Image: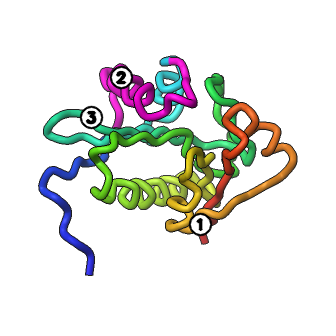
Amino acid sequence: MTPPTPPWCPLWRPMQPQDVPRVNAIADRVHQAFPEGPHVVRERLALFPPGCRVADSPSGVIGYAVAHPWGLLPPLLDSSLVALPEQAECLYLHDIALLPETRGARLGEALVRYLQDLARQIAAPRLALTAVYDTPRYWSRFGFTPYRTPAIAEKLASYSATATFMVLELG
């Protein structure tokens, strides 16, 4: 049986340009080891609005997700994409950050379901992400598995020695 959703549980809604300063503030707090400039979120939002979501609560934005169509090589940290591929090899979850007080609200589950549907809409055969910190075990709960190639290892060097590229095949 699924436990009831807490009444304060935020909803994932489309990110708007006015959300970007709050998104960047959350990123600065949650991802101190992986700083990216404000241009990154602004660019992703402009290139692929359906992949940019915020977790909204009565107290305001408390988390965000940024995803976009991509290939099977993660983009370098803090880099511009310039353009998206015509045919996506994956829907790449570029970033997700949730404030610590959101833990237990099951926001990841709702987000992964949304991203799976979005990937199917754009005919991407898989989701992909770069797991940092100690999150590979968390992402494996959803079916993500490590995906390694020498080229991926080279790209991940801009993240950290423990970063893991992971994919979820959509059957």
Residue to which mark 1 is pinned: 170
What residue sits 19% from the left and 41% below the top? 57
Crowdedness of circle 3 by 10 Å Cα count: few (<14), some, many (20+)?
Answer: many
Q: CA distance from mark 2 to mark 3?
A: 13 Å
The three-letter code of the residue at mark 3 reads Val
Residue 43 screen position, x and y as percent: 53, 23
Q: CA distance from mark 1 to mark 3?
A: 30 Å
The three-letter code of the residue at mark 2 reads Pro
- Horizontal relation, residue 49 to residue 144: left or right: left
In the structure shown, which secondary structural element does the residue marked by tag 1 occupy?
A: loop
In this picture, is 52 found above or below 150?
A: above
What residue sits 80% from the left and 44% below the top? 153
Crowdedness of circle 1 by 10 Å Cα count: few (<14), some, many (20+)?
Answer: some
Residue 11 screen position, x and y as percent: 25, 48
**Span colored in magenta:** 14-37
Residue to which mark 2 is pinned: 17
Count of labels in the image: 3
